[in-house]
Image: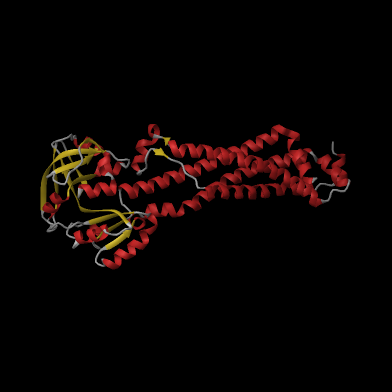
Amino acid sequence: MLLVIAWKNIWRNKVRSLIVMVSVMMGLWAGAFILAYVFGMINQRLEDAIGSEISHLQLHHPEFGVDYDPQFYLDNSQSIIEDIEVSPMVDAVSGRVLVYGMVASPSTSTGGKLIGIDPEREDQVTQLASNVVEGEYLRTKDRYKIIVGKKLADKLKLKIRSKVVLTFQDVDGNIVAGAFRVKGIFRSYNSSLEDGNLYVNQNDMSALLKTNGQVHEIAVLMQSGETVNEYVSTLANRHPKALVESWKQLSPELGLMIDSLDQYMIIFFVIILLALSFGIVNTMLMTVLERVKEIGMLMAIGMNKIRLFGMIFWETIFMVLIAAPLGLLLAYINIHWLSIHGLDLSAIYQEGYAAYGFKPIIYPKLEAIYYYRIMILVIITAIVASIYPAITALRLDPVKAIRKI
């Protein structure tokens, strides 16, 4: 009987009740969509960083990361690569010769990260060949050919077959230089990669640096991200002279972002629900104050405080239980559609996102567990929001309430 009365009371003022329901529905839709947008953007950034930049893990000489001195290369690096390749846990592996130096064209010069690669292995790890938009990707037999980023090519006024001179220090500290022809120009979603990375054949770079065919960095792409920590420990034991680091150690800011995302999103959603709760409290308080005479009459004819509290409580719960599933359903439909087709922001934020390593097309994603969490938070919010209006009703004096005009 109490539930029936509460249900009918909702529709006594349809406009006000619908406004509250629509507010809750739109608030939940917006909150869930923003959650999905942020989760999609961060997860996409992680996939891109692993698939195109740092891989799942890397091996270096323990002292190489201090100041990237080329003399600190990995001893027996080719045997390490062969050992990693045979593991069933590994998808691909690539060795890199690294050095920072100057890049000079006939027009100007700038600094850059010079990377000597095995073209076939590097493409398996980072899909670099698919990013080449002008010219061709490197081949193993190419000699003194180079591929550069589009932004760097524009800065140095380079085109296909242009000559660039690379200048850097070898392992003995001597200044060496090499002339290379531009074979390809690549584009990247990350403007820092497009502006700073240059790729040449590993043999050419090794000969100039005098690393005797050894590499400074070994990047490993795993079959599954869940086995990274286990394989890091395995490699550290098998190759104790190498520093083995997972992607979280290589990019701690990205690891922190992933680890703290849940907490930040819960706080964000609680703030949204807190704002909605004020609207619910205000509406229910207006409902109580408009029905002072009626509530006084109910108390006078014997309705006890528990039932009166329950009536106000269930009116609040019913409104939220109608609005919340509709809001989450609307959010699910939007999120599911955009997770397939993507949200293209390239016309507005392409350069801004590229500066931070994000792609301009975002694919929102929200796991089912978050819908349940949101629903639980909404119910808690409704319960809390119903308390003050219900207490206000309980404080009414039946005699005075009946006489109220």
Residue 374 percent coordinates (x, y)? 57, 47
**Left or right: where 399 falls relative to 196:** right
Q: Is residue 115 visible?
A: no
Colour approach in the figure: secondary structure
Q: Is residue 364 above or below residue 249?
A: above
**Left or right: where 320 falls relative to 153:** right
Q: Is residue 297 visible?
A: yes
Q: Is residue 189 above or below residue 262?
A: above
Q: Quadrant of residue 65?
A: bottom left
Instruction: Tell me which residue sits at (64%, 43%) in the image.
Output: 278
Instruction: Tell me which residue sits at (32%, 42%) in the image.
Output: 190
Q: Nearer the viewer, residue 402 or 87?
A: 87
Residue 232 percent coordinates (x, y)? 33, 62
Q: Is residue 301 above or below residue 56?
A: above
Residue 11 percent coordinates (x, y)? 74, 35
Quarter placement of the N terminus = top right
Q: Quadrant of residue 237?
A: bottom left
Q: Is residue 141 above or below residue 59?
A: above
Q: Nearer the viewer, residue 136 or 74?
A: 136
Residue 206 percent coordinates (x, y)? 14, 53
**Left or right: where 90 falls relative to 322:** left
Instruction: Tell me which residue sits at (37%, 42%) in the image.
Output: 358
Quarter placement of the C terminus = top right
**Left or right: where 354 falls relative to 151:** right
The total of numbered circles placed on residues is: 0
